[in-house]
Structure formats: structure tokens, C-alpha cells
Image (tube, rainbow, N blue to C red):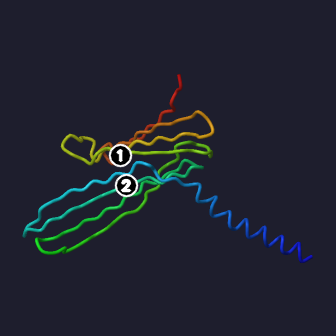
């Protein structure tokens, strides 16, 4: 009877140890992070620098993903740093594929807005692939400038 109890405890501990590892394998960070910074002058000889960076966190089982962004704003005069502010978070985005599977993923964004950008802040592209089949989907998401983003995905054909 003691052997059975010890065996049950060993099985329970090994399952408990494996469960977090299995969950950790369900997410992948995009391979294409970017950072952009801008500087501005304020009245009274103050300088402000603002930097933003983003990445994407992808669920490799469901094809849902999150767009994550972090920003830092630094204000200084000629002698000292006056203020540092940070902000950030992740926003959930829709699934790329309708069914669960084993997927790979990457994403990239357009450059920050400039005088040539008439669609507002630009957009981003997402690529996802089913790693168990020859299946790739490419998506482009752009800001319409009218409130909602426009998102279109296309399944790739292989010739």
C-alpha cells in the first residue's frame, strides 16, 4: 500500500511539474521588435525625448495574439532630468486561424507617422503558418483614419 501511495505522489508531482512547461510553450514572442524615438523642445529650454517600442505575443495553439507596447518620456533641462514617465500594455487581437493547431508567427509595423502618411498612424502586417501543414496566412491591418482599423488576411497559394 505504501508503494502505491508513493507512486501516486510521484505521478502527481511529475504532472504538476510538467503543466507549467506545457503552458509556457503555447506562447511565442515575435522576432521583429522595433524602437522609435523623437525629441522636442519645450518653452524654457526644456528637452523632451519620447521612445516607443512594440512586440507581439502569439498563442501558438489558438493563433490569438496580443500587440504590446512600452513607452518612455524623459524631460530635462541643461542640468538635470526633471521627469520620467513610462506607460505600456498589451491589447488582445483576433485569431488568425479559426481552429486550434500548431502555429508559428511574426509581425512588423510601418514606420511612425510622418507627412507622407495619409492613413494616420500606419499599420502592421502579421504572418502566421501552420507548422504541421503547408499553410501560411498573411494579414495587413491599417488604420482607416476614420476610427476603426481595416484588416484583411489572405491564404497563400503554393506553385
**Horizontal arrangement in the rendering, residue 87 relative to residue 106 (left or right):** left
**Residue 127 at x, y percent in the picture:** 47, 40
**Residue 147 at x, y percent in the picture:** 33, 48
* In the rendered image, the vertical position of residue 99 relative to residue 52, given as above or below: above
Secondary structure under tag 1 reads strand
**Quarter where residue 50 is shown:** bottom left
**Horizontal arrangement in the rendering, residue 59 relative to residue 43 (left or right):** right
Which mark identifies residue 48? none
Residue with the most extreme top position:
159
Q: Are marks 1 and 2 in contact (CB under 8 Å)?
A: yes
Residue with the most extreme right position:
1
Residue at screen point 34% across, 44% down: 123
**Residue 90 at x, y percent in the picture:** 43, 59
* In the rendered image, the vertical position of residue 91 relative to residue 138, given as above or below: below
What is the distance, in whole Å, between disc 1 and disc 2 at their CAs? Answer: 9 Å
Secondary structure under tag 2 reads strand
Location of mark 2 (residue): 54
**Residue 146 at x, y percent in the picture:** 30, 45
> Which of the pair 54/80 is nearer the observer?
80
> Which of the pair 150/41 is nearer the observer?
41
Q: Earlier in the sequence, mark 1 or mark 2?
A: 2
Residue at screen point 18% across, 58% down: 39
Residue at screen point 46% across, 37% down: 138
Location of mark 1 (residue): 109
Please state the total of marks drawn on the protein image: 2
> Which of the pair 105/80 is nearer the observer?
80
Count neighbours of disc 1 (C-alpha within 10 A) and say few if under 14, some if 14 to 19, many if 20 or more: some
**Horizontal arrangement in the rendering, residue 87 relative to residue 77 (left or right):** right
**Horizontal arrangement in the rendering, residue 65 relative to residue 2 (left or right):** left
Residue at screen point 34% across, 51% down: 34
**Quarter where residue 1 is shown:** bottom right
Amino acid at each position: 500500500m505504501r508503494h502505491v501511495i508513493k507512486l501516486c505522489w510521484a505521478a502527481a508531482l511529475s504532472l504538476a511539474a510538467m503543466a507549467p512547461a506545457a503552458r509556457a510553450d503555447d506562447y511565442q514572442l515575435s522576432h521583429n521588435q522595433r524602437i522609435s524615438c523623437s525629441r522636442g523642445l519645450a518653452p524654457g529650454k526644456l528637452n523632451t525625448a519620447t521612445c516607443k517600442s512594440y512586440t507581439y505575443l502569439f498563442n501558438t495553439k489558438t493563433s490569438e495574439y496580443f500587440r504590446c507596447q512600452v513607452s518612455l518620456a524623459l524631460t530635462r533641462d541643461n542640468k538635470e532630468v526633471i521627469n520620467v514617465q513610462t506607460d505600456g500594455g498589451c491589447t488582445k487581437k483576433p485569431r488568425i486561424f479559426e481552429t486550434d493547431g500548431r502555429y508559428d508567427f511574426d509581425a512588423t509595423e510601418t514606420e511612425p507617422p510622418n507627412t507622407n502618411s495619409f492613413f494616420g498612424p500606419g499599420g502592421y502586417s502579421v504572418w502566421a503558418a501552420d507548422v504541421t501543414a503547408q499553410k501560411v496566412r498573411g494579414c495587413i491591418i491599417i488604420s482607416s483614419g476614420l476610427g476603426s482599423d481595416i484588416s484583411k488576411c489572405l491564404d497563400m497559394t503554393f506553385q
